[in-house]
Amino acid sequence: MGAINKKMVIDANTLVGAMWPLERRDVSLEKLKREMDKFGVTKAVTLSAKGIFYDHTLGNDETLKVCLEDPRFIPALTIDPRKYLGYAEEIKKRIGEGFKILRLFPDFQGFMINSIHVRRIITKAEELGLPVMMPVKAGITNVLELLRELRGLRVILTGVTYFDLAEILTAMEESDNLFIETRLLDSPDGVSMVVEEFGASRLIFGSGAPLGYVGSSLNLIKHAQISEAEKRMVLAESVKKIIEGR
């Protein structure tokens, strides 16, 4: 039960940057690549921390540069809703450049996910077929309201812990388009509980690297009481289906 298919592991939650302003941490591209090489991560969805803390346009430019230089990286764009102008054009431009996921950071940028302006940004993403990744701290009730209204929207929640599961599993009963990133599901039965209730396709492997640890995130899936086929689904196939629009 412990083996993992080495052919494909896609980490859906990584970032890169010159610095992490909240604390002294190495978030360099070099460190992320070392982690990927060490643990056999085939591809990684990533974005520049500059887009979170400084300017989303410059951050998206930096993300694109990283991904063009190394095909192992899949670009995620971000929009800072505090900057009103140009969000629709920015999303369209980045989709044209091959960006696959929109990431929102209400916890770092201090906005409400259910505000009028943020809803417009998410609506535009849904219209253009772009999945959205956001932290569970955005509020599961707010997320579920969006999913009820925007039937084509697909949402991946990050930062989900075992203690969030009762609320989230209830929401997942209402929407097939709600997915969980696995990094903090660190209880013995958290992964298997979701798989048993909804199937492995609703779980997306992510580590938060280089802030988080790829090895511990992989071990969470490796030791989960699910089948090898289900592990392969969590580690790569789930996110492939989402970013390919299947």
Image: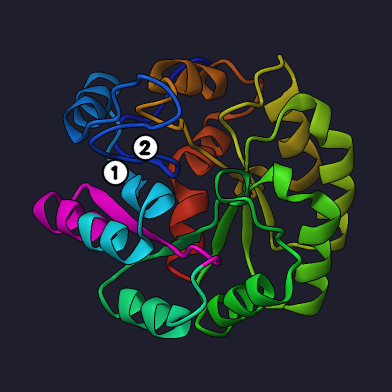
Type of amino acid under label 2 = Val
Q: Which quarter of the figure has residue 133? A: bottom right
Type of amino acid under label 1 = Lys
- Rendering coords of residue 59 (x, y %): 30, 57
Q: Which residue is mark 1?
A: 43
Q: Are discs 2 and 1 less than 8 Å apart at CB?
A: yes
Q: Which mark is residue 197?
A: none
- Rendering coords of residue 201 (x, y %): 61, 49
Please name which of the two marks, 2 or 1, marks the residue nearer to the observer. Answer: 1
Most distant residue in the left direction: 69
In the image, taking residue 213 as reference, residue 71 lies left or right, namely left
Q: Is residue 114 above or below residue 18?
A: below
**What secondary structure is marked by label 1?**
strand
Q: Is residue 140 above or below residue 79?
A: above
Q: Nearer the viewer, residue 59 or 15?
A: 59
Write the start and end of the magenta stretch as one range. Answer: 63-82
- In space, the residues marked 2 and 1 are separated at their CA atoms by 7 Å
Q: Is residue 69 magenta?
A: yes
**What secondary structure is marked by label 2?**
loop
In the image, taking residue 208 as reference, residue 189 lies left or right, namely right
- Rendering coords of residue 89 (x, y %): 39, 85
Q: Which residue is mark 2?
A: 9
Q: Residues within 10 Å of mark 2 (few under 14, many from 20)?
A: many
Q: Quadrant of the N terminus?
A: top right
Q: Residues within 10 Å of mark 1 (few under 14, many from 20)?
A: some
Q: Nearer the viewer, residue 36 or 60?
A: 60
Query: Residue sitting at 46 percent across and 23 percent down?
Result: 218
Q: Is residue 13 above or below residue 83?
A: above
